[in-house]
Amino acid sequence: MINRKETLRYLGYLGQKIDEQTQKFIEEVEVELENSSSPKSIYREYNCDINGDTILIDGLVINSANLAKNLKECKHVVLLAATIGRAADMMIKKYAVTNLAKSVIVQAAGAAYIESYVDEIEETIRKYAKEQELYLRPRFSPGYGDFSLEYQKDIFAMLECSRRIGITLTEGNLMIPTKSVTAVIGLTTKERASCQKETCSQCEKQDCEFRQREIIMPCGVL
């Protein structure tokens, strides 16, 4: 389900009153997007070994100081891929011609939708981990810090993303459909304090390990 607060955050609304026309457009977009989307996901657990800034996940070697820090003391990780399907991309293209305001809203609602969907998957993984007396580290995606997008190809191969959930990669390692996510989630025996804020936008701590990456919205006029 689309998180309305997150849609508004991606649109740049920070507590301002929304006019009736924009409110109507948001409601219409959310209904259309939820009715036409087809969320799919896949995730698998792998052994993990860390040596300095080098991470070995099964046969995949990753060089990333940021990811190594995130996975510190983790012996296992979950690789995850998820998408809400092509509906958002098709709606953006349609409304870019017929209703620019709605096109921008679809961008925001689609971003909020995929994030909430991945949150649901992560909660399922968290319940599984709890049964194993393990705890989740914050999910970390290619493109964060020095975790290069080049590793998308390896994650796609390991999870068989194209065959199983219909996500493909461009030459620049961007995902199609665009409202898709890949991530690495560490599993650790050590419980750590979690963030108490509802969203990262409520917090000024920029270097927090729990901070989610901001999705940059394209320019548009509402």
Image (spheres, grey):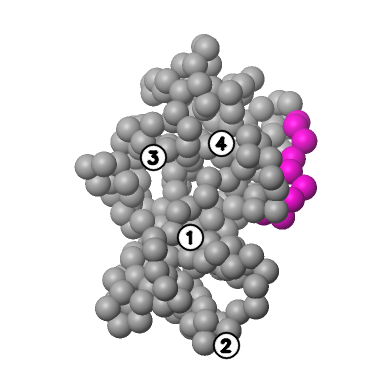
Mark nearer the viewer, 4 or 3: 4
Q: Is residue 192 magenta?
A: yes
Image position of 12 with respect to 96: above or below:
above
Residue at 31 percent of width and 36 percent of height:
153
Spatial CA distance of label 3 from label 1 is 22 Å
Q: Is residue 153 visible?
A: yes
The three-letter amino acid code for the residue at tag 2 is Glu
Which residue is rendered at x = 32% and y = 33% of the image? 150
Q: CA distance from mark 2 to mark 3?
A: 44 Å
Residue depicted at 36% across the width and 77% down the height: 100
Q: Nearer the viewer, residue 129 or 185?
A: 185
Region rendered in magenta: 191-199
| Residue topped by disc 3 | 159
**Disc 4 marks which residue?**
185
Answer whether labels 2 and 4 touch (C-beta < 8 Å). no
The answer to whether marks 1 and 4 mark residues whose Cβ atoms lie closer than 8 Å is no
Q: Earlier in the sequence, mark 4 or mark 3?
A: 3
Residue 186 placed where, x, y %?
58, 31
Magenta segment includes 61: no
Given the image, on which type of amino acid does mark 3 rest?
A: Leu
**Neighbours of disc 2 within 10 Å: few (<14), some (14-19), many (20+):** few
Q: Residue at x 59, y 28 (%)?
A: 70
Identify the residue position indicated by label 2 in the image: 20
Q: Secondary structure at mark 3?
A: helix
